[in-house]
Image (cartoon, grey):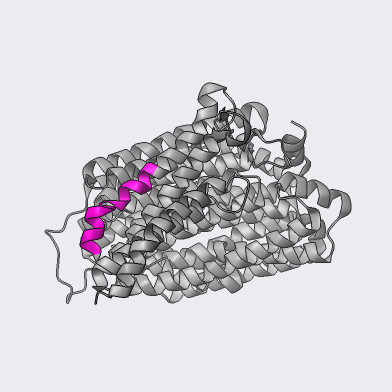
Amino acid sequence: MKSQIIQIAATYLMPFLLVLSLVVFYRGHNEPGGGFIGGLIGGSAIILYAGAYGLEITKKLWINRPTALIWIGLAMALLSGFFAYLTHGSPFMTAVWVQIGSGPFALKVGTPLLFDLGVYLTVMGMLVKVVLTVMEEVL
Amino acid sequence: MILFLPIIIPLFFVALLIMMRKNLRLQKWLSAIGVLLQLFAAVTIFTEVRASGTIFSQAGNWPAPFGISFFADYTSAIVLIAVSFVALWIHIFSFGAIDRTRQKFGLFVLFQGLLTGINGALLTADIFNLYVWFEVMLISSFVLISLGATKSQLRGAVKYVVMNLFGSALFVSAIGIVYGQLGTLNMADIALKINQQGLNLPLNSAMMLFFIAFGIKAAVFPFYFWLPSSYPAPPVAVTAFLSATLTKVGVYVLIRFYSLFAFHQAEFWQPIIYGIAAITMVSGVIMAASAYDIRKILSFHIISQIGYMIMGLGIFSVFGLAGALYFLVHNMLSKTTAFMSAGLMQQKYGTFDLKKMGNLYRLHPYVAFLFLIPALSLAGIPPTSGFFGKFLLIYAGFSAGAWIVTISALVVSIFTLFSMVKIWNEAIWKPLPEDVPVHDEKRMNRTSVFASSVMAFSSLLFGFAITWFFDVFIRAGEQLVNNQHYINAILNP
């Protein structure tokens, strides 16, 4: 039961949702948002696509093995905690920040961002894995 | 850094095992290596605690009342070692005792996930962080109970998750009240502020909510009814793991919270705790007397023995707390051995029903012996660890003048002996019933037998080496009785 309306809506909504998920993810350090909610938005974009176009094409075009995202994300979050310990010898999870450029366009990156990226990937992988598995069984 | 290792190692192995999920053989051994590393980390923490009394560390280098503190004293180090040790041998036991399908669907990932939550809950000194570790434990254990999706497992898992979600909701509301009243989440800071200004009405109600939330986890009297239906449902190795870790973490947190915050209102709490302890002990053991399934009998005994630990908490003297902790570790070791030997019997007879067993003493005298050790220990026969645990508790109980609960503890021991004798008579002495087919071809898995032997031996050793352990547990009790140790270690390092 593929509906034309949903397909067109998904085509326009999906890039919007993916970009939104990245924006929410990035602003999350100081404002509402973050890796968890970003991962949920990004995962729901892929689920929307799968609902509109079917499982096979989604797996082919977007995501073949969501499980990989889970362990990559977990490993990334762990590594971000070790970073300060390896460079400065400070306790686990100490933040290290680097500023790239200056003025209004300065980009601050640091280990909390890496941690959040790990959360983003884990949540997205988990959500997509669960929903696609359920869809496989139901459809 | 060493304080974070018991959390980092299992989390790392969760990622690694998900990566390796196609290769079952590698996954098994990697997971066991992961638990072995945790055991090393736990032993290192224990030696450091023995050197300096307490150790602590701040996550993310934020200063103490604001950042999340991680803290270990004798109590947490002891429970940490016991958890890692038991987890290691249950891992090895489960190689031969759990079917391949379950292993393939992430059994070891879930074991490691559960260990992450447990180790985190044992080491953290921040109540909201504690809540997060409880959720980690809840999710992993929920999937562990339902893994395999048989009818009884799903029934048990639903009861388990509903009860525990309810407990989590209470836990969070209590955290909210405490934060609203005192403006801090650090356990040392909360204890300090309560020391200064005492407990007011909202804080007292928060303490009650905490007690109910952890009481659900620990399965004490009015909240235990999820346990008999959800613990016996999964394979016996999983049951052993949950009984040795989950309920015991509930007791650990109860001890921690009572000794830090609630003891100010001892005149209110003591009768409640004594009453709950007595009813928990008696009702657990009476339900066990009526059961004929080994797993059910042992699961009811979990409840009954939680009562002993709660009793030690209520006495709240050095001996009482040391006894409660000693009893907790004794129970982890003996109960796991008992579950393991029940698992071996099931491999032989294909069932847990005592009526369909018999003649084990002639068929496998060694396994009968493996069951004898935890049975004597659980009943409290002298040279075993159960005797010393009960001795400490009952001594403390009579010194504190808590007659009713102490006498009921003595009576419950006799009923425990009765249950153990029942298993012994039915499965081991009795000739095999005639209508039961003999499974001569069914063999027990050698790896599992080896793991059970190690557990039985260590449970014996835990009783025989009482002089050494006694010293350690008394120190743990001394640290618990005075919450100033905890406050000073974190706030004035």
Does residue B5 show up?
A: yes
| Relative depth, front residue between B298 and A66 | A66
User: In the displayed image of the protein, which residue is found farthest to the left?
Assistant: B441
User: In the displayed image of the protein, which residue is found farthest to the top?
Assistant: A88
Q: Is residue B262 magenta?
A: no
For the point 60% across and 67% down, the residue is B169
| Relative depth, front residue between B455 and B405 | B455
Q: Is residue A63 magenta?
A: yes
| Residue A115 screen position, x and y as percent | 50, 41
For the point 76% across and 37% down, the residue is B491
| Relative depth, front residue between B481 and A14 | A14
Q: Is residue B214 left or right of residue B149?
A: right
Image quarter (top left, top right, bottom left or bottom right) of the C terminus of chain B: top right
Q: Is residue B465 above or below residue B252?
A: above
Q: Is residue B98 left or right of residue B483?
A: left
Q: Is residue B213 left or right of residue B433?
A: right
| Residue B114 screen position, x and y as percent | 44, 51
Look at the image and give the residue range highlighted in magenta.
A55-72
Image quarter (top left, top right, bottom left or bottom right) of the N terminus of chain B: top right
Q: Is residue B317 above or below residue A134?
A: above
| Residue A100 screen position, x and y as percent | 54, 29
Task: Indicate the quadrant where residue B436 lies.
Answer: bottom left
User: In the displayed image of the protein, which residue is found farthest to the right?
Assistant: B197
Secondary structure character of the magenta stretch overall:
helix
Q: How many marks?
A: 0
Does residue B393 show up?
A: no
For the point 46% across and 40% down, the residue is A77
| Relative depth, front residue between A72 and B186 | A72
